Amino acid sequence: MEMEGADGAAVPPSLADRSHRSSISSMCARSVDVLVYLIDDTVVQLSVDSLMSVTVHELHRIVRDALQLPEYAMEVFALWLISPLLEVQLKPKHQPYKVCRQWQELLLRFTDCQEDEIMQDEPSLQFRRNVFFPKRRELQIENEAVLRLLYEEAKFNILEGRYPCDVEDCEQLGALVCRLQLGPYNQDQHTACALKEKLEAFLPAHLCRRGHSLLTALWKRGAKQPAYEQGLLQAYQAVREEAACEEPEALRQHYQAYLQRCHQLPYYGCAFFYGEIDKPAQGFLHRGGRKAVSVAISLEGVYVMDSKEKHVLLGLRFQELSWDHTYPDEEEEHILWLEFDGENEGTLVNKLLKIYSKQAELMSGLIEYCLELNAAAEASALENSTLQSPTLPPLANKQRPKLRRQNSVVCSRIQHLATIDYIEDGKEIKRVKPKRTASFFTRQFSHGATSYSAVQAPAESLEQG
């Protein structure tokens, strides 16, 4: 956010990156022109008095009035500071001007960016969904303007691959985007070729790019590549249209249909953070390395996703996990620890996943706050039910359910994780040795080309920690 006329000229934003944009366009004697961006890059220009002291709550109300949204939009949406390096949802009591002045300090504290990147980075104010607004209440929204804003944000997250989806779901969602952008299906205008030209406007970018790699070009003669435009076209043809329904009402229904399908994704409405996890050891040298992941946190749980492959590695609801955050004085790096139930060669174990990230402190704080909000909501619901029914059955002793493993991108891939496995034996905690990969000698024997006999070493030296 560029602050002209404050303490000297600010570093101008890069025109090459759309996320490097100024939210302060001019400063007069009494008022400042503030630019607030919507998720689709639409700009809301506001004239704000006393910018240096205005709070997020006050600015939020000015935005709501400018967009002519209903009063409850104050709960649905929030103001965020966004840049390519960091995303922060502001609290109602925050003063945006002061937070912007501290932006470089925040980047130093919560990112691993280079100094020159930090010096050039500039946040913009964005009006987007409030992480703490429950999905169940979103289903009750009927206002078309509010639904459109929620739809645009959900569509952005789908197309950017932040919400991993199976291909079938991508096609269904893409079909609704076709309907909303192109109108009702017309067989003369809406052909597979026409959709293919604009495929990235309807389907996630990583799906569209798969047909253009060098490796794919080499395969082209021998293997038929997925024609996603065909599935998209069929889904577009199948979009239901209510008879005698006026277009404004039809748009509202399609916004709702898109959002309802997105609500089935467990990470809908999450805040996103970035980090790395250890790769499972591979080969007889047990070489590993790290994998880039995005961590999504909502009121419902925590989801760790492969940034490259666009699928879930681990999804945990809060009742399925324990967590902790350690600082560099305790470990070499900032780490968010996730603990959950699992198995190791048929033995029930506790699993620990290490997420390396300078944003671990932010993630830990958000998890704790979400748990507090959930506890308050449960207490309120219990109080209301007690007033209606004085006698309640005793609460069951709930155990964390076992995770389901499926082929869907939405479900956990625990086998792709390098976890620390342990069991508690009385007061003693015993580390469970990881399953050994196929050894070099085993592979040699399988070929039957040698009669080499392995030397028997002491058992302790053969164990891998």
Image: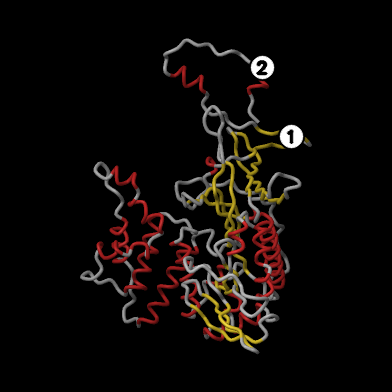
From the viewer's side, name the closer residue of 444 and 105.
105
Q: Nearer the viewer, residue 353 or 406?
A: 353
Total marks in image: 2
Tell me where residue 363 sits by quadrant: bottom right
Q: CA distance from mark 2 to mark 1?
A: 25 Å
**Residue corresponding to mark 2:** 458
> Which percent across, then down, holds residue 354?
64, 45
SS of the residue under disc 2: loop
Q: Secondary structure at mark 1?
A: strand
Q: Which residue is mark 1?
A: 425
Residue that extends furthest to the front in the rendered view of this protein: 8
Question: Is residue 390 or residue 216 the one in the foreground?
Answer: 216
Q: Position of residue 52 (x, y in %)?
A: 69, 80
Tell me: residue 353, above or below residue 383.
Answer: above
Q: Quadrant of residue 66?
A: bottom right
- Residue type, mark 1 in image: Asp
User: The N terminus is located in which quarter?
Assistant: bottom right
> Residue 395, position in %: x, y?
70, 57
Is 403 situated left or right of 227 in this image?
right
Residue found at x 34% / y 62%: 199
Point 68% across, 81% down: residue: 54
Judged by depth in the image, the label closer to the viewer, 2 or 1, is 2
The amino acid sitting under disc 2 is Pro
**Outermost residue toward the bottom?**
30
